[in-house]
Amino acid sequence: MKGAHKNLSIDGKNYCMKHLAPFTFMAELANIQGPVQITISYSNHVFSDQKGNGPAVSADRFFCADRYAASLNLPQMLTTNLLASYIVPHINKSNNEMYHYMEVHDYAIFFDLRKDNSHPNGLKLYVVSAYEVNQWGRHSIPKNKPVKFSFVAHLRLNGQTYYTSRKAKRR
């Protein structure tokens, strides 16, 4: 399947990436009529970093055993906890609207959420990065006002973003 990560073999140890294969599921979300089809895919940032402590997985990313271990729970977190939780919209360095979710206060998940044009009630959720937040890194986590995932999902299904909807309300 497109977007699937290949299994890795590092120092004789095999790392299965099956849990990071793209998948689609149906979800009932508050204030949205009918089930929503959500397709989830992942970047290699959920199992790699730029610290150089492991073998290279791309030009500027290196395998990170800690991130890999934490990523094993990502599919479950995204299909259960995230859907009923609050997320923090923010603008990334490329000036794109992104979202941030904290799982149990120490695991940050950064993702993009877009309307899936191939399905009338569909969303594509792309996990850009996910990692455990150390005390020293807490200052860099976006601190904007949290909003319900279902609210942002409703906006995205209607072709809007959180920030454009807020600007429209101010007028």
Image (spheres, rainbow, N blue to C red):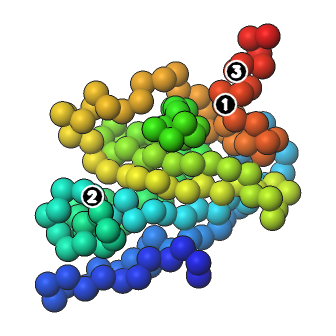
Determine crowd level at label 2: few under 14, some 14-19, many 20+ residues with C-alpha closer than 10 A: many
Q: Quadrant of the N terminus?
A: bottom right
How far apart are the two marked residues, 2 and 1, measured between alpha carbons? Answer: 29 Å
Mark 2 near mark 3, Cβ–Cβ under 8 Å?
A: no
Callout 1 secondary element: helix
Instruction: Please tell me in which quadrant of the rendered image residue 8 appears.
Output: bottom left
Mark 3 near mark 1, Cβ–Cβ under 8 Å?
A: yes
Q: Nearer the viewer, residue 163 or 103?
A: 163
User: Is the residue 107 above or below the residue 78 in the image?
Assistant: above
User: Is the residue 73 above or below the residue 137 in the image?
Assistant: below
Determine crowd level at label 1: few under 14, some 14-19, many 20+ residues with C-alpha closer than 10 A: some
Callout 3 secondary element: helix
Tag 2: residue type?
Answer: Asp
Which residue is under mark 3? Answer: 166
Q: Identify the residue at horizontal 84%, vertical 51% (top origin).
A: 34
Q: Nearer the viewer, residue 75 or 44?
A: 44
Q: Identify the residue at horizontal 60%, vertical 55% (top origin).
A: 125
How far apart are the two marked residues, 3 and 1, measured between alpha carbons? Answer: 6 Å
Which residue is under mark 1? Answer: 162
How far apart are the two marked residues, 2 and 3, measured between alpha carbons? Answer: 34 Å
Which residue is under mark 2? Answer: 49
Residue 12 is left or right of residue 8, and the answer is left
Residue 82, labelled with which disc?
Answer: none
Q: Is residue 99 visible?
A: no
Q: Is residue 140 visible?
A: yes
User: Is the residue 119 above or below the residue 87 in the image?
Assistant: below
Q: Identify the residue at horizontal 33%, vertical 37% (top origin).
A: 105
